[in-house]
Amino acid sequence: MTAHTITIDGQQVPFIEGQTIIEAATAAGVYIPHLCHNPEFTPHGSCKLCTVKVNGRNCSACTFPAVDGQEVLNDTEELNETRRAITQMLFVEGNHFCPSCEKSGNCQLQAVGYFLNMLDAHFPFFYPSREVDASHPEVMLDRDRCILCELCVRASRDVDGKNVFALSGRGIHTHLIVNSTSGKLADTEISVDDKAVHVCPVGAILVKRTGFEVPIGQRIYDHQDISEVSLAMEESVAGESHGG
Amino acid sequence: MADKIKVATTSLAGCFGCHMSFLDIDERILDLAQIAEFDRSPLTDIKQCSDHVDIGLVEGGLCNSENVHTLREFRKSCKILVAVGACAINGGLPAMRNHIPLEECLEESYLDAVGVENPQIPNDVELPLLLNKVHPIHEVVKVDYFLPGCPPSADVFWKFLTDLASGREPSLPYELVHYD
């Protein structure tokens, strides 16, 4: 291992050639908030929550390669304000009614909101009409909660080899589609053990008949914030770089 | 203490669950009564806010014209207006009707539902008109503070009110911030 380093908030962070900033940070135990990034998959760079300042410029830490001597700002009031606004926009764009959602307490969007001490949504709500797909006997797709992170798209294509999901449309009209002639999950090869079913950071893709199995108080983010959970889960994976 | 803090509360399109949770402060309400008095509130049954209320706690979102009227009265009277609970903050469960046209909601409830007798859509002049969509309160008035939760726990109310009463900027630690 060569001695490459960047600094994050003044702290020396070593990295291996080819690592992104977030991979180096995670391996060093530094949490950078993120939703569409998952160390097991090729970076997507769409949610922008991991925005950091690199030598004075805003960059997505999940896609930006670490380069010797970079000065990175991460946990600053300004960046966390920006991240809070991004999270608020994600909340108003969809229909995120936590009290009636099975994912509540285990949801990364919600947990990021908690981490950033987001108490309200600030913006007017869109209340979009989105289609629920309950056609599959075991897997449920509720587009109301989809944040378009493409993790299911990546997992189904790259791990499951089934290519069940895709994004369609542009801008505010972007939406998750199912690759079958009927457009329904029931007519795909998806199965309950697929990576795509379990990688969703929110409650958009759920396994039926498992809701509310874990009682309040024992859910992932009830007592631990997402920075602790995320680092514990991702630190080991972060060592294996995906390269540029 | 000469002047007690005046607190007004109301439930708009809510379920009164936030009020019930507020009452879960249990015997701490005696300490609260030392420094605060209730103005307009379902707890006092006072129907109008005084001219100068210090803190207005608003539960529930806006589903009809009366909700909007009450909210505006609270904003006019209260120095500090607080959105209490998921419904006040994002519309909550009532807002789940927002993707269904209002006409269809009424038909389903009052005409087509199983077991409906003498089917008719209520249309008395006394009834406030329903809004096309349910809205959170920050879309209509300026809101000063937000207490998330469905409902916010008694400790959230206690932390918030004691912070305010002591002149501290209210803040909620991680354990007290919940959207459910």
Image: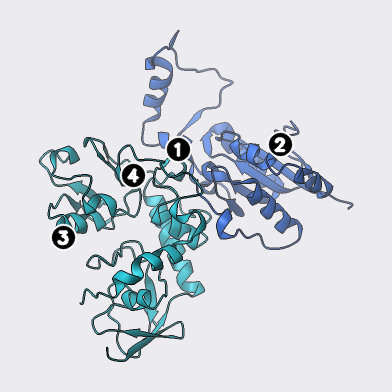
Chain colours: A cyan, B blue
Q: Helix, strand or loop at disc 3?
A: helix
x and y percentages locating residue A180 in the rendered image: 12, 43
The CA span between labels 3 and 4 is 25 Å
Specify which label sits upstream in the sequence, 3 or 4: 4
Position of residue A42 in the picture relative to residue A218 (left or right): left
The CA span between labels 3 and 2 is 57 Å
Q: Chain of mark 2?
A: B
Q: Residue at x 52, y 60 (%)?
A: A117
The reply to whether callout 3 and callout 4 are in contact (CB within 8 Å) is: no
Which residue is disc 3 drawn over?
A158
Query: What is the number of the mark on residue A144?
Result: 4
The CA span between labels 2 and 1 is 24 Å
Q: Quadrant of the C terminus of chain A?
A: bottom left
Residue type at numbered disc 1: Ala
Residue type at numbered disc 2: Ser
Q: Helix, strand or loop at disc 4?
A: helix
Which residue is disc 1 drawn over?
B95
Disc 1 crowd, CA 10 A, few/some/many (<14, 14-19, 20+):
many
Position of residue B178 in the picture relative to residue A46 (left or right): right
The CA span between labels 3 and 1 is 38 Å
> Residue extending furthest top?
B118
> Considering depth in this image, is B40 or A181 the residue closer to the camera?
A181
Tell me the mark number nearer the camera, choosing from 1 and 4.
Answer: 4
Residue type at numbered disc 3: Asp
> Considering depth in this image, is A96 or B28 the residue closer to the camera?
B28
> Residue extending furthest left?
A181
